[in-house]
Image (cartoon, grey):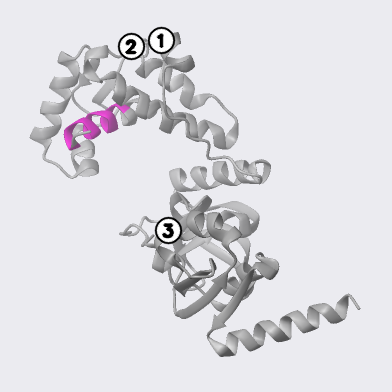
Amino acid sequence: MSMKMERLIGILSILLQKDSVTAPELAKHFEVSRRTISRDIDQLCRAGIPLVTRQGAGGGISIMETYRFDRTVLTREELQDILAGLRSLDSVNGTNRYGQLMEKLSAGESDFLEGGQSVLIDLSSWYKSSLAPKIEQIRRAIDQHRTLTFHYYSPNGESHRTVEPYYLIFRWSSWYVWGWCLTKQDFRLFKLNRMEQLCVTETEFTKRHVSLPNLRNERIFPGGIQVKILFDPVCKWRLVEEFGVECFKEQPDGQLLFQADYTGKENLLTWLLSFQNQAELLEPEDLRQELVRMLENTLKKYQ
């Protein structure tokens, strides 16, 4: 999808959510000139979307409540991609608000809505009942520029945080909020499953200049431990699923030599134990000895 098409869809999305918006506001939001926005609005009108422009104080661009999109503005493939994304958001909270929006986008074609798409995305999880209210609270706080307070559980301990929220993020099968932490005086990424006693305060904040969070794998899962592990052949499917086919070398006896720069000691030991007796940690030696002590202490509990 071209940048222009993405901008046209973005403009329509804003007009769906707001009664009216000005051309300067759209130009600032999409980081283009007012002349470009004027051309976009003209193109949307030519595509059959009834937009109304009012001049003067309180004026702006708005869209008629009873409109339907002309099918010439989007291809069927583009509509299917948008539908998959919108339905994925409905899967989080069990509503049909985005499906209803899609009815407008697809001009009410029931066959298209019911089964014409080829991509289905479900963003819900085992924690859906607890995640949905958190997501709604965070979205409200972001929209209203209100701070969030919550009790947070992290590997470094428990703490009470007050945060200016900016982005709600789905990454690596988990939901996060990215915001300015007033406790740490810095931007931080917080995992929703670790947040309790979440509350949207009455305190409004002035929006900061905020950059997108760094979501590279090595930032979320920092490396630092060079490991060598010997796996039984029956573990091949898990290694392929979790790290890819290049992560191990098959030995003459069929065993799999795994080498990687792993994330951290606790994660490594927990991951290794999930293989029971089908894996042997070869290096580093200090972690091998720590694993031995852990297993000995565990054995004592069951003797």
Q: To which residue does mark 1 refer?
A: 108
> What residue range appears in magenta?
3-12
Q: To which residue does mark 3 refer?
A: 245
Where is 83 relative to 111, above or below?
Answer: below
Which residue lies at the image location 70% right of the left edge and 84% below the top edge? 292
Question: Between disc 2 and disc 1, whose residue precedes?
Answer: 2
Q: Label 1 is placed on what type of residue?
A: Gly
Q: Is mark 2 on a helix, strand or loop?
A: loop
Q: To which residue does mark 2 refer?
A: 68
Label 3, label 1: how far apart the Cα atoms are: 45 Å
Other residues around mark 3 within 10 Å, as few (<14) / some (14–19) / many (≥20): few
Task: Inspect the magenta stretch and tell me whether residue 9 lies in it.
Answer: yes
Q: Is mark 3 on a helix, strand or loop?
A: helix
Label 3, label 2: how far apart the Cα atoms are: 48 Å
Secondary structure mostly taken by the magenta-highlighted segment of the chain = helix
Quarter the C terminus occupies: bottom right
Q: Where is residue 194 in the image (x, y as percent from the top left)?
A: 62, 60
